Image (cartoon, grey):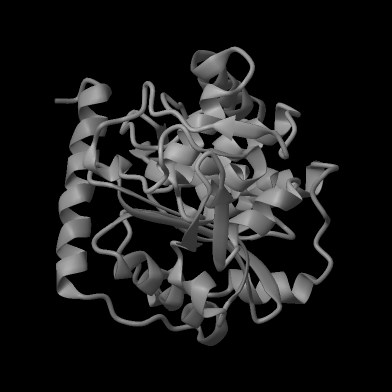
Amino acid sequence: MNTHWMRLFFLIGALLTISTPAISDAGRVDQLLNLDPENVRVASVSAAVIEMDSSVPLYWKHADIEVPIASITKLMSAMVIIDGGQSLNEKLVVSRDGFSSSKSAYSRIRPGSKISRGELLRISLMSSENLATHVLAANYPGGMKAFIKAMNDKAWSLNMLNSRFQDPTGLNPGNLSTAADLVLMIQAALNYPRILDYSTTKYHVARFSSPRYRLKYANTNPLVRKGQWDISLSKTGYISEAGRCLVMLTEVAGVEVAMVLLDSFGKRTPIGDAARIKKWLTTGVGGRVSKVALRYEKKKRLVYNLGQQASEGNI
C-alpha cells in the first residue's frame, strides 16, 4: 500500500472509531500532511511516524514487513502483567530457571534475592532488564506458557494481526511484528499510566532483600536520560537479528507523535533517525545519514525482500 492510500486509510479509521479523538485542528493536520517524505532520510529498515490525535501517518517506510523486535516486546509484556491484576507490591524471588543463556541475557540481579513486582516492572521497561522480565512472566498465573499465550491474545485483541510472541523479553528472534502493528501497541499503552511512567524513568535505584543490596539503573534511551525531548513513552531494543530498535511517543512543536524505528545499524542510528524526523517535522527538511548506516539498511532490506518473495513462492 503506498503512502497516500495508507494515510487515507488511517484518517478514515480515526474518524470512524469512537475511542479515537476527532481532528481538533484541521490546519495543523493539513500542514503535517503537506510535508514531503522525500525530504527526510531514515536509516532504519522499517519505520512509521504517526500524528496521534488523528492517527494520520506522516512517514511510512516498509511498515508492513514482519521483523524481529527484540526488547520492544517488553511493552506487550508490561500490558499483560498489569492486566493480570497481581499486586505490584508483592515480593518475588528471583530465579534463573528457564532463563536464556545468551550473552544478551546478562543480569546483575542475584538469584534468590527478593524484590517487588512493581520494581521488576520498572527496571524491565526503563533499563530493559531481561531477568526481571523473565521473573515477572514466570510468576504469572499459569506460568510462562500462560503468559506467552496472553501476549499473543492481547496482540490479537489490539488488531496486531502481523505480530507473534515466543518469549516475554525479546531475546527470542521469533518475536515478530511490524512498524504498523507497533503503532497500535503504542496507542494501547497510553491506557497504562505505569507504563508511561516506568518507561520514561531516567534513573532508578532498585532495592533487593535476602540478601539486602541495591542496584542503580539508567534508561536505555539517551534522549530520555538527557531530558531535552518531551517523551511520554519509550522503549529500545537490540539483538543481532533485530538490529537497533526504538519506539517513542514524543511531542514535536506541540504535536504528539509516535515514532517506530526498527532494525538500524549501531546504537546511534535510531537516535539519529529520531532527530532527523524531528527536524523534518519542524523545518520540512531532515539531516544526512552515514554511509555505513545506509549500507546496512540496503543489505537488510534485500534480505527481507528475498524472504518475502520466498514466502510468497516467487523464488
**Left-right relation of 87 to 124:** right
Q: Can you give x and y, in whole percent of width and height, for residue 32 in the image?
A: 62, 73
Q: Count of labels shown? A: 0
Asked if one can make out residue 183 in the rendered structure from this viewpoint, the answer is yes
- The one nearer the camera, 91 or 73, is 91
Above or below for 224 versus 105: below
Q: Residue at x 54, y 67 (%)?
A: 203
Asked if one can make out residue 259 in the rendered structure from this viewpoint, the answer is no
Say which quarter of the image contains residue 269.
bottom left
**Left-right relation of 276 to 103:** right
Q: Can you give x and y, in whole percent of width and height, for residue 69 in the image?
A: 39, 42
Which residue is farthest bottom? 283
Q: Residue at x 58, y 74 (%)?
A: 34
Q: Quadrant of the C terminus?
A: top left
- The one nearer the camera, 290 or 130, is 130
Q: Residue at x 59, y 56 (%)?
A: 199
Q: Can you give x and y, in whole percent of width and height, for residue 228 in the image?
A: 55, 82
Q: Can you give x and y, in whole percent of width and height, for residue 309 in the image?
A: 22, 30
Q: Residue at x 62, y 51 (%)?
A: 8
Say which quarter of the image contains residue 141.
top right
- The one nearer the camera, 173 or 28, is 173
